[in-house]
Amino acid sequence: MTIPGDYRRGRHVVSALHVHLVFVTKYRRGVLDGAMLRCCQTAMRKVCADFGADLRELNGEPDHVHLLVEYPPKVAVSALVNSLKGVSARRLRAEFTGRVNRASMRGHFWSPSYFAASCGGAPLSIIRQYIEQQQRPA
């Protein structure tokens, strides 16, 4: 459940967690096109919904995709990434069999690594300054 101000409200928590993810194709092969990105977006949107997360944005280039995901605090980013990559790879292989050659990518669509960065909210310098200015009890 989302409340005004882009905050998610749970039973015992109010949160605003966003992560910027980047997935690279195996060997940085430039195999992605517009149709494949649309397929990826559909698959990844479904995975996010299953995790209680929201895929806010997805775009990419022939050899990588960028995602902006808003997620609840109970979700481990690594588990979300694992599902996003696994489901999207299976869907892409099923729908674009001729375009995605298993032999050239040695059985994998995505590289095993990924980039993840927390994002949103105030810059760290502002948060650090806010914390430093708190009235510490004597």
Image (cartoon, rainbow, N blue to C red):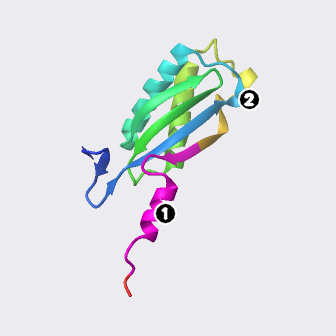
**Quadrant assignment for the C terminus:** bottom left
Q: Which element is circle 2 on? A: helix
* Relative to 65, residue 113 above or below: below
Q: For residue 87: magenta? A: no
What's the residue at 71%, 23% (across, down)?
A: 29
What's the residue at 31%, 59% (across, down)?
A: 13
Quadrant of res 65: top right
Which label number is shown at residue 27?
2
List the single residue furthest toward the top.
98
Q: Which element is circle 1 on? A: helix
Nearer-the-camera pick, 119 or 100: 119
Which label number is shown at residue 128?
1
Nearer-the-camera pick, 44 or 122: 122
4 relative position to 44: left or right = left
List the single residue furthest toward the bottom.
138
What's the residue at 75%, 21% (across, down)?
A: 104
Q: Marks 2 and 1, how far apart in space?
A: 40 Å
Near mark 2 (Cα within 10 A), the count class, few <14, some 14-19 or many ≥20, is: some
Q: Which region shows up in magenta? A: 116-136
Quadrant of res 74: bottom left
50 relative position to 112: left or right = left
Q: Amino acid at mark 1?
A: Arg
* Relative to 27, residue 54 above or below: below
3 relative position to 105: left or right = left
60 relative position to 5: left or right = right
